[in-house]
Image (cartoon, helix red, strand yellow):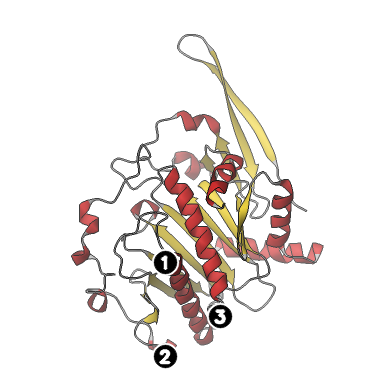
């Protein structure tokens, strides 16, 4: 049903004094997305800039006066929702405020801020702030679906600090809906349909059963969500959350779904903070066409630190081979992350 394929190769040479050295590399293929990646173990010995301590943003980033997401600026600096949605200018849920993205990626790109706290250190946000922001995103996507039934390829993402692609440090999520299928939507649509036709069951639920049975990468649960380290990481310290039996991002009335997800996100962030990573991304995608859509799965990846003269986590290798190269085995990631699920 699933092939957890690992190939090993080695690079052999001598150091400057004639001592023989062997460096092992693992090539793994993700059994869900069928994407190949590499574990380059020896790179862990390199000096990695930006993780010798936990860095905070520079002073100029901490200035509320110049932040368009702070409450004193938001009405003058952020756009208003399309009249087609027949909603207020900005969608509000408790302390979360959602509005269009000034620099959109899709026909329906939005930004949902958590609250009025300008900067929140990795892993220290409240569960409620994440939960409410996720609910706001879900509500927005539900309204989009009513007005544009063809924009079924949806996502909720986060770019935590500029090192992860965020332009502002004020905590926020990004939300997307489009009628043009993305590469990942295409892959997961085909994989879930083929799996259902062949085995009569759901791809992510079956994958989770395998990981729990193996036990090497399974981390733990937060209510409805189960968490495991990615077998073939697409980024550093990648962790997956899977919600068996739930396939839609439009469940904005299901508070438990979003609160349990928020707990897992924060557990992951606490783990990242413990290894001095102050930046990360998460992604959740869904296909809201009312057919046999994939169960919800979130991927969280640590990024290079937001720090002076940091080393990027993307090199020429990734562009040349179209494969991610990390240096930490996911089995080690799971072992260290489990401490934050107990």
Closer to the chain start, of discs 1 and 3, is 3
Residue occupying image coordinates x 49% and y 84%? 143
Note whether residue 106 is visible.
no
Residue 189 sits in quarter: bottom right
- Secondary element type, mark 1: strand
Residue under label 3, please give it.
150
Q: Nearer the viewer, mark 1 or mark 3?
A: 1
- Secondary element type, mark 3: loop
Residue 333 sits in quarter: top right
- Secondary element type, mark 2: loop
Q: Nearer the viewer, mark 3 or mark 2?
A: 2
Q: Report crowding for label 2: few under 14, some 14 to 19, many 20 or more residues within 10 A (C-alpha).
A: few
Q: Nearer the viewer, mark 1 or mark 2?
A: 1
Q: State the CA–CA distance, disc 1 to disc 2.
A: 22 Å
Residue under label 1, please give it.
173
Circle number at residue 86: 2
* Viewer-nearest residue: 172 or 6: 172
Closer to the chain start, of discs 3 and 2, is 2
Percent x, y of residue 50: 35, 40
Q: State the CA–CA distance, disc 1 to disc 3.
A: 23 Å
Percent x, y of residue 13: 54, 17
* Viewer-nearest residue: 221 or 33: 221
For the view shown, which residue lies furthest in the top direction? Answer: 17
């Amino acid at each position: 049903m699933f092939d957890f394929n690992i190939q090993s190769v080695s690079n052999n040479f001598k150091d400057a004094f004639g001592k023989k050295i062997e460096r092992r590399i693992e090539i793994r293929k993700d059994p869900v997305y069928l994407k190949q990646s590499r574990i380059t173990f020896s790179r862990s010995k390199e000096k990695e800039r930006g993780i010798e301590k936990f860095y905070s943003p520079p002073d100029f980033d901490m200035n509320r006066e110049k932040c368009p997401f702070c409450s004193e600026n938001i009405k003058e600096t952020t756009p208003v929702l399309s009249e087609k949605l027949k909603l207020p200018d900005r969608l509000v849920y408790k302390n979360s405020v959602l509005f269009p993205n000034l620099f959109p990626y899709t026909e329906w790109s939005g930004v949902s801020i958590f609250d009025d706290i300008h900067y929140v250190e990795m892993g220290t946000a409240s569960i409620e702030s994440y939960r409410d922001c996720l609910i706001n995103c879900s509500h927005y996507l539900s309204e989009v679906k009513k007005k544009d039934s063809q924009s079924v390829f949806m996502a909720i993402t986060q770019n935590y600090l500029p090192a992860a692609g965020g332009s502002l440090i004020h905590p926020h999520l990004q939300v997307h809906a489009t009628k043009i299928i993305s590469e990942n939507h295409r892959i997961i649509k085909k994989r879930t349909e083929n799996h259902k036709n062949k085995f009569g069951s759901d791809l992510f639920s079956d994958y989770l059963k395998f990981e729990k049975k193996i036990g090497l990468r399974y981390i733990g649960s937060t209510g409805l969500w189960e968490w495991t380290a990615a077998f073939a990481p697409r980024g550093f310290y990648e962790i997956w959350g899977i919600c068996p039996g739930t396939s839609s991002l439009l469940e904005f009335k299901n508070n438990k779904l979003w609160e349990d997800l928020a707990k897992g996100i924060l557990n992951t962030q606490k783990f990242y903070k413990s290894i001095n990573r102050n930046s990360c991304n998460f992604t959740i995608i869904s296909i809201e066409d009312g057919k046999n859509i994939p169960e919800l799965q979130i991927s969280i990846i640590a990024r290079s630190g937001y720090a002076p003269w940091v080393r990027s986590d993307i090199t020429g290798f990734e562009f040349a081979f179209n494969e991610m190269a990390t240096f930490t085995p996911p089995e080690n990631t799971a072992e260290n992350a489990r401490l934050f699920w107990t």
